[in-house]
Amino acid sequence: MKDIGYYSLLKQIKTRVEHVNIENTLSRRRLASAKTGTPQSRQRTGPTATYACKQWQPELPTGESDAVHEEKRQILENMSQRYSKSGAERSDVSTLMKDTYYFQRKHINDAEALPVTVLKRKWPHLFVQKFLCAHFEELTGINIHQKLKQAMQECGRVDFFKSKPTNDCVKRILSTEEHKIEPYVIQLLLAHFRENQDGLLIIADLSISHTKLI
């Protein structure tokens, strides 16, 4: 179907309305659950609440129970305390995180809306980049790393800044040599909006030996 102006505009407005209403929809659903006592995982979730998510709240896997998932969650919590950050590289941790996706979503979608501090204590690995990205891919079907790389390749053009540098910081960054487009574009955007990059990027001198960095 050939795209026409008002069709694209209609899609944008619809997406924006869904985005604005998502919190209200979730609040109503949680309030209804609290009044009726209906388990959150059994409620039918509408398209606005799920907001393009493919696995918002999956069903309990056949032959399993919440008790089994709670045991796995406790194992993960103990492993996080035992191995700290190095535990994220363990294959058994990866397997357990994948197997407990249903239970993770149940806690995230809980009618009582668990505070982030509690959620972080229950699922510490979920706040590690590796597993956060894996959870996002399971939730939406989108590999965020591939999507970001693709977006950078398709949209990461610096011709605008080269033709019309907006400030001295942009000029300074343009004068440096950068082979990877992703950090280059991010630095240019930060410079354009006069934002401090220290909180987002870690700049390291690759000529320094690994032992010195440690």
Image (cartoon, rainbow, N blue to C red):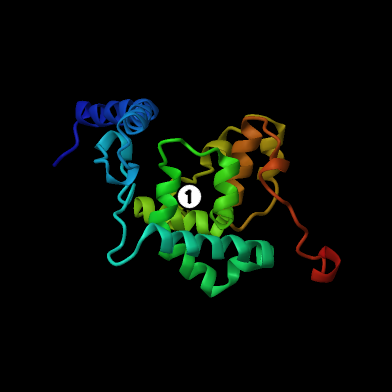
Decide if residue 196 is on the left or right side of residue 153.
right
- The residue most toward the right is 212
Above or below residue 180? Residue 46 is above
The percent position of residue 25, horizontal first and vertical second, equals 33, 28
Asked whether the viewer can see residue 192, the reply is yes
Relative side of 113 to 177, left or right: left
- Name the spot of residue 90 as percent of width and height, x first: 58, 72
Name the element at disc 1: helix
* Crowd tier of the residue under label 1, counting other residues whose Cα lies within 10 Å: few below 14, some 14–19, many 20 or above: some
Quadrant for the N terminus, please. top left
Q: Which residue is mark 1?
A: 152
Q: Residue at x 82, y 63 (%)?
A: 213
Q: Quadrant of residue 142?
A: bottom left
The amino acid on which the numbered mark 1 sits, given as a three-letter code, is Met
Q: Residue furthest bottom?
A: 91
Total numbered badges shown on the rendered structure: 1
Relative to 12, say whether 175 is above or below: below
**Residue at 42% across / 41% down in the picture?**
110
Which residue occupies 49% across, 63% down? 71
Residue 26 horizontal/vertical position (percent): 36, 32
Q: Is residue 142 at all visible to an observer of this figure? A: no
**Residue nearest the viewer, comparing 110 with 202:** 110
Q: Nearer the viewer, residue 120 or 50?
A: 120
At horizontal 36% and vertical 28% (from top left) the residue drawn is 31
Q: Nearer the viewer, residue 205 or 160?
A: 205
Q: Position of residue 43 (x, y in %)?
A: 27, 41
